[in-house]
Image (tube, helix red, strand yellow):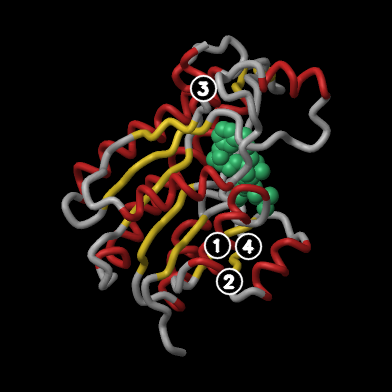
Amino acid sequence: MKLLQDVIFITGGGQRIGAFLVKQFLAETNYPVVFTYRTPRTQVDELVALGAIAIQIDFMDKEVLPGLVKSIQKRVGSLRGVIHNASLWLPDVMDVNDSQEIEAGCFETLFQLHVRTPYFLNNALQPLLKKSTSPLKDIISISDYSVERASSENIAYLASKAALQNMCKGFAKKFAPIIKVNDIAPALILFNEGDSDSYKQKRLAQSALGIEPGPIVVWQAVQYLMNSSYTTGTVLPLEGGRSLL
Ligand SMILES: NC(=O)c1ccc[n+]([C@@H]2O[C@H](COP(=O)([O-])OP(=O)(O)OC[C@H]3O[C@@H](n4cnc5c(N)ncnc54)[C@H](OP(=O)(O)O)[C@@H]3O)[C@@H](O)[C@H]2O)c1
């Protein structure tokens, strides 16, 4: 089988922002796209029909990462970009287990997905990024602008996204000058299905621009970072003036 060159690899591409990025890369660029998804859904089939390669994976299984890298290596000769998009939003939960020990149920999950997975993949996929003939090669993570603010209810989530931001700087230093590594830190991009009108109004009032911008603004940020030859190790806020209020 002929290996694909200058591929874009996106985690969590089966819905919403990730799926939008997959579609945009297919429509607006010549880069082949490989993405991961966890939950089978029609949108995944649609992306495959458009030409993307989909790999089903659950990053909660710590053993799957080497297998994922192997299946990428089987099909991909070089990578133009890696986008760490897969994410979960979980509130802090403290569980008491059978032996009456307190466990932070969400903590392992969030750090596995937002920290350990990108850490492993950055190191394991570096050789494929280096093989790209493109003069620019990128790793982009998607964190969360809320890292800038304190929350008493989402401590583990924000700590894991803060670690993701910090990791971007470390890898930017480690992989320079060959691979740029940046992070996008979005505030509100897209409401979730079922968000109430009062919740929506509250969230919209939190930014100076006061809109739900949709995934197009993430695509614009990805484009900026990938086209820039002088940006690495940055956390790019995408927050509609949230910091002004
Ligand atoms: N939406 C916003 O307004 C907003 C705001 C701030 C930051 N962000 C960030 O922007 C990115 C995209 O946001 P989004 O709203 O599109 O996220 P989303 O709808 O929650 O999608 C994230 C994807 O991550 C995948 N995922 C979750 N747990 C996984 C696991 N254990 N193994 C493998 N994949 C897993 C999910 O896969 P399946 O669906 O296949 O299960 C899902 O498609 C995320 O990093 C998010 O934190 C978004």
Q: Which of marks 4 and 3 is in front?
A: 3
Please give the residue where the numbered disc 1 appears in the rendered image.
Answer: 35
Mark 1: few/some/many CA within 10 Å (<14, 14-19, 20+)? many
Q: Distance of mark 1 from mark 3, alpha carbons?
A: 26 Å
Question: The residue under label 1 is which amino acid type?
Answer: Phe
Query: Is ligand 1 closer than 8 angstroms to the Cβ of mark 3?
Result: yes
Q: Which residue is drawn at 54% across and 68% down?
A: 26
Q: In this view, does 122 lie above or below 112?
A: below
Q: What element carries label 1?
A: strand
The location of residue 52, given as percent across then percent down, is 58, 71
Label at residue 52: 2
Q: Quadrant of residue 221?
A: top left
Residue 109 visible in this rendered orientation of the protein: no
Label at residue 56: 4
Mark 4: few/some/many CA within 10 Å (<14, 14-19, 20+)? some
Q: Which of marks 1 and 4 is in front?
A: 1
Q: Distance of mark 2 from mark 1, alpha carbons?
A: 7 Å
Q: Residue at x 73, y 61 (%)?
A: 43
Q: Are marks 2 and 1 in contact (CB under 8 Å)?
A: yes
Of the residues under marks 1 and 4, which one precedes in the sequence? 1
Residue 152 visible in this rendered orientation of the protein: yes
Q: What element carries label 2?
A: loop
Q: Quadrant of residue 95?
A: top right
Query: Is ligand 1 closer than 8 angstroms to the Cβ of mark 1?
Result: no
Please give the residue where the numbered disc 3 appears in the rendered image.
Answer: 146
Of the residues under marks 4 and 3, which one precedes in the sequence? 4
Question: The residue under label 3 is which amino acid type?
Answer: Ser
Does residue 184 appear to the left or right of 21 in the view shown? Answer: left
Comparing 116 with 238, the one in front is 238
